[in-house]
Amino acid sequence: MFGLLKKIFGTEQSRRLKKYSKIVLSVNAWEVKFQSLSDDEIRHKTVEFRQRIENGETLDALLPEAYALVKNVCRRLCGTDVHVSGYDQKWDMIPYDVQILGAIAIHYGSICEMQTGEGKTLTASMPLYLNALSGKPTHLVTVNDYLVQRDCDWIGSVFRYLGLTVQALTNATPPYLRKSVYASDIVYGTASEFGFDYLRDNSMAQSLSDQSQRGYFFAIIDEVDSILIDEARTPLIISGPSSVSRQMYDELKDDVANLVRYQRDLCNRLATDARKILDRLGRLVEEAESRKLNKEEEIEEKEAFRKLWLVGKGTPQNKILKRLKENPHLRAEIEKWDTYYYGDTNKEEKAAALSELYIVVDERANEFELTDKGIQAWIGASQDQSKSDDFIMLDLGHEYAQIDGDPALDEQGKLQKKVALREEDAKRKERSHNLRQLLRAHLMMEKDVDYIVAEGKIVIIDENTGRPQPGRRFSDGLHQAIEAKEGVSIQGETQTYATITLQNYFRLYEKLSGMTGTALTEANEFKEIYKLDALAIPTHRGCKRKDDDDEIYMTEREKYNAILKEIQEIHKQGRPILIGTESVEVSEKLSRILKQNKLEHTVLNAKNHAHEAQIIADAGKMAAITVATNMAGRGTDIKLQPGAAQVGGLHVIGTTRHQSRRIDRQLRGRSARLGDPGSSKFFVSFEDSLMRLFTSPGITGFLQRFRPPEGEPIKAKVLNKSIETAQKRVEQRNYTMRKHTLEYDDVMNKQRAEIYSFRNEVLACQNTLALAEEILDSVCTQISEQFFVDRNQENGWNPQGYGLWLMSHFPLTFDEKTFDNDYLSLEQIQEIASEKVLKSFKLKIDHELQTIRDVHSTAQRKENLLSPDDIINEVIRSLLIRNIDRLWQEHLQHIDHLRSEVHLRAIGQKDPLVEFKHEAFTLFDQLTLRIKQEIAHALFKFEMLPPQAAPAAQPKRIEEARKPIERVQYRTSLSLITELENTSSSKEDPDNALSKT
Ligand code: ADP
């Protein structure tokens, strides 16, 4: 069946390739014509094309000529010097037909799969030129600042020749220049810079002129799988210091470390006991299988295996357990307990067994749970009374009802009690949250795998690229928890100001497309989420790499021995070797093995990435051995040095299969670039985490029968399949997780779009005074609906209440009888209220205008003064913006809490996503109402003060808000964070920050 699907897929692909190939012919024909034009005539083409577009010609129709023009300019540039990254480089490229083919696919919104070295950078130039002719924003998104600058300099020479402007957007681009960068026809930038500018424009800008972007028309994403797939779970977050901090990592860390130690000791004891018993029963020698056990011994043996099973649930990485599991018979016996406990009938028995542990760890789901015993140990570990409350959450609804029903309390007393209760609730939630994150840091996060400790800081290692991510932080307190675990200084708590996922950012574009060396494995996802088709473009020259079958071993030990042997053999032939490893830890381990065997080599990992360029440059030398993490996977171009091609080129060794097939393909792709010779081979063991966690249970039985002699690989085709199935399983799981992130963000996306568009309306508004009046009027109406529901219903008509509300929110007085009149319709009531509020507002504004005029009259220099009306207009704008921002930030925090809370409800058989959507919707409704109310309130509360220093009549607040935002960027693997230093809003409104729980 798959064969059939493949065929359909294949024809679909070839059909499109065929169609585009015809266009390539037309491009080439045009290019021949262009060869006879003068340089000036070529340059003038841009003007002509733009004119034709203005006259209604489509970009599609223009494509062959535009692409031909780019190709022709490349021809003309040949031999000229281009200044790139500090050096002069000679231009020597004219697009090959396959590049033109890719360029056509990109214009039509495809993701092009082009192998490394095929020249994606040049390919992108054609669609960029064509689409920029429209005058609309055209962006090229690439993975790092270095490539942004390099490609902008290098390929930019074509655009500049043709009279288009092109600029680079990097982390180093200062805020005041960004607007002019975006104004150019084509912008090269990184995904995070584009995304952060979007957030800043929509949540920080205080005026239209503060906004830098000018829309989203066409984007080409280079290494599109890295950005839309690997980074997809990493939302961008702008955050600032939280004004209230409750975090308790310092206070809790020792007790958590103790608890984790209890568990480790317990499991060690269990494992040692079990091993002793098995040893005594002669179960540890392979051939002893035949020995017959008596009844008692059988029970003992069974119990020993059960203990080992338990160790696997408590400390899956336990060394004794790992060692015992190398023997497939023992492994099978242990796994029998899994099957036994899996059944419904043995559920209780399983629970009883697990209750021996303190913590149950589920490595596969990346989760853990404290048992009752764990909770008791936690409470008992110190005299701290509050700990007994750590696992009891308050039922606020119930508690509030009790307070409300307490006759002994007056209104004030009730309010106080509720505030205290809320505070207590927030504290408990924070404590239990901190506790969970500390446990996660200990149980799930591994040093030198997930992060390294460098210069007293926790530095995340990107799981896909193996690169250190200084400045990035794990979100939601996990980073602080790891800091506590490793005993380095713990950072303060932060608060989210604005956030978006990269996926949703890129969905803003009218047209999206991408390029990568590896797209087809994720083709479905691109299609489903972004409506993008993936298309494999043939290579310019054929690929000569020889990919060997995987070698599969029982144990890691045997696997490493085999790898060593392979290295020694290939090394003797003088071929360069690149060895890919999954973590810093493994790269160091392998390096030790090589050292012991006197094999000279270089290591490239997150700890010594400073020498990356040199290491990569040397990696193609004769007999070079390079051990690298996934860092060597993407964008690194290993060029064969003299002689290396003759002996067979680069040999790539994979030391395990990665969770994603794409990453494996990237590693393979380092070898045999541009028609060079080369080969690759992967080594796998059944102790690799992929195999341990994701292969099907049947495999153990299979191994039991086919265990080869020590040191020999297992030769069975079925295993290759089972590895691939495991990888597919993980890919599927990760896909689900990304989709999940997106589904949650989709809810936010709608709300964000609504708030941002309202905010932009305020920024663009010429007459904010009129807008303010509209808001006041609508608040009067909205509030009235709460007090006047139904005249004929008891408590359904409350004129006094309405009057009181208005008086308490605005500086007004109403006669008791104003609204208490049977002849007044609701509309009339609203009108009376609104009229009065607006009249009072006008008085207020007149008063403020007078203040400004007074100040102006005393000013010495009058030429630069804004008119009083303009000043009021700006003051109101800033007031509106500040209130929108403040309440939106609060809302973001509520949503954050909601997200973590709904997951607890999953236990109650409710779909957390449905719950989330429902409640987020309600919260948003409340938010829009609150924004209006608080704005209405604030409109009466501001006051113009004569400035301290005479000349500037501008209100201080606006100036402050316009200050360029200073920022320290930092990212987390779960969220990408830009931290702002004390923005004005958090400084001025102490009630702004809610606690984070
Ligand atoms: P990719 O990103 O696809 O791996 P690059 O854009 O980095 O590839 O290009 C790889 C190499 O091929 C570069 O050295 C580039 O100069 C060269 N190259 C690309 N296209 C051409 C061309 N049409 N003619 C000559 N050299 C080219």
Image: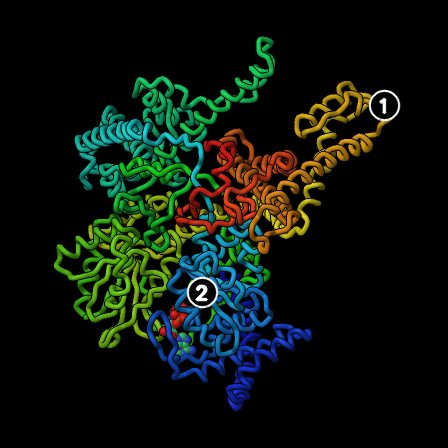
Q: Nearer the viewer, residue 812 or 859?
A: 859
Does the rendering let one see residue 687?
Answer: no
Q: Is residue 703 above or below residue 312?
A: below
Q: Residues within 10 Å of mark 2 (few under 14, many from 20)?
A: many
Checking the image for residue 681, the label placed there is none
Q: Amino acid at mark 1?
A: Asp
Q: Is residue 198 above or below residue 336?
A: below
Q: Position of residue 265 (x, y in %)?
A: 24, 29
Q: Residues within 10 Å of mark 1 (few under 14, many from 20)?
A: few
Q: Position of residue 222 (x, y in %)?
A: 45, 63
Coloring applied to the structure: rainbow
The quarter holding residue 854 reads top right
Residue found at the far right of this picture: 823
Task: Answer whether labels 1 and 2 touch (C-beta < 8 Å).
Answer: no
Q: Is residue 598 above or below residue 161?
A: above
Horizontal side of 37 relative to 88 (left or right) equals right
State whether label 2 is within 8 Å of ligand 1. Answer: no
The quarter holding residue 974 reads top left
| Element at label 1 | loop
Horizontal side of 947 relative to 810 (left or right) equals left
Q: Amino acid at mark 2?
A: Ala
Q: Position of residue 387 (x, y in %)?
A: 37, 21
Which residue does the image show at 47% across and 75% down from the upper left? 99
Query: On the rendering, which quadrant does ligand 1 occupy?
Result: bottom left
Q: Nearer the viewer, residue 16 or 784?
A: 784
The quarter holding residue 661 reads bottom left
* Residue that numbered label 2 is attached to: 168
Tell me which numbered mark, 1 or 2, is placed earlier along the sequence. Answer: 2
| Element at label 2 | strand
* Residue that numbered label 1 is attached to: 822
Q: Nearer the viewer, residue 559 or 595?
A: 595
